Image (cartoon, coloured by chain):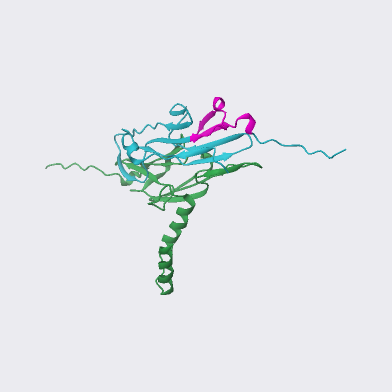
Amino acid sequence: MAETVKDIRETGEERQERPRKTYAPAVDIIETNNNILVIADMPGVDEKSVDITLEKNLLTIYGMIDTSISSDLEGSLSEYGIGDYQRIFSLTDVVDRDNIKATVKDGVLKLVLPKAENLRTRRIEVTGAA
Amino acid sequence: MLLREIERELEKWGILRDPFKEFNRMNLELVGNLYPERGEFPPVNMWKNEEKVVISTELPGIDPAGVDLSVTGKALTIKFERKPEELKEGEIYTIKERWYGGFSRTIELPFNVETDRVEAKYRKGVLSIELLRAENEKPKKITVSSE
């Protein structure tokens, strides 16, 4: 199947230019009859700190994290890094760009990319010949 | 593949692999390559001072009511589950990287804690647990008086 949403990995050099650490969130992409669903794990992000941009065919997901912790505590175990999230996908023309919807709940971003009208799966009724 | 062949050879000679290593490897396969350097899931961060310890872990998209926390002595156990998306007919995954299933992890705390005063919060997909150091374990200042 042709990929409608393609993952674009950033190179290490591009990442280093940023002042803050960024991580690529884990995503699931589900294709339904009418939509393409992008689900991304972005713990620490809410609807105010997520930024979604579509420039030409590049869809960028960016999530900002508040990294501050109480100063009277000292770190004693650090198994995961905390930083912003970024992931870029390239979209093909099959997506209806004007009707992309996004929601964030419990650190999970859900993006609904509707398929362009003419590409939706249609059920074709088969009728018996009279 | 080559590594596995060598391991198989070693097994033939009676040099068995560490069973926990094997378990961790399987666990890693389940979790994916998010945390390739560790088998422990979920990864946690811990902060402390003389009075308390704070543990945080990233569990996006879980139902906090289904999280099971238990504390005994110096051990904290976190149990939780994340259910996969329910796909209807005709829906397919094109990319599947997120973790699913039930997990449990026990973390060793730096000191004994007050087991009835555990505070857990779930916010924006991050679970943080604050535990107070047991009263009888807190360091005491002893003043020296001169005679």
The residue drawn where x is 42% and y is 71% is B9
Residue A15 magenta: no
Residue B36: horizontal and vertical position, in percent?
A: 40, 51
Residue in the foreground of this view, choosing between A10 and B56: A10
Colour representing chain A: cyan
Relative image position of residue B42 (x, y in whole percent): 43, 47
Q: Residue furthest left?
A: B147
x and y, in percent, of residue B116 in the image: 43, 43
Q: Residue at x 31, y 34 (%)?
A: A17
The quarter in which the N terminus of chain B is drawn is bottom left
**At 46% from the left edge and 50% from the top edge, which residue is drawn?**
B32
Up-down relation of residue A36 to residue B115 (above or below): above
Q: Which residues are magenta?
A: A90-119
Corner quadrant of residue A98: top right
Tell me residue B51's x, y (percent): 32, 40
Q: Which chain is green?
A: B
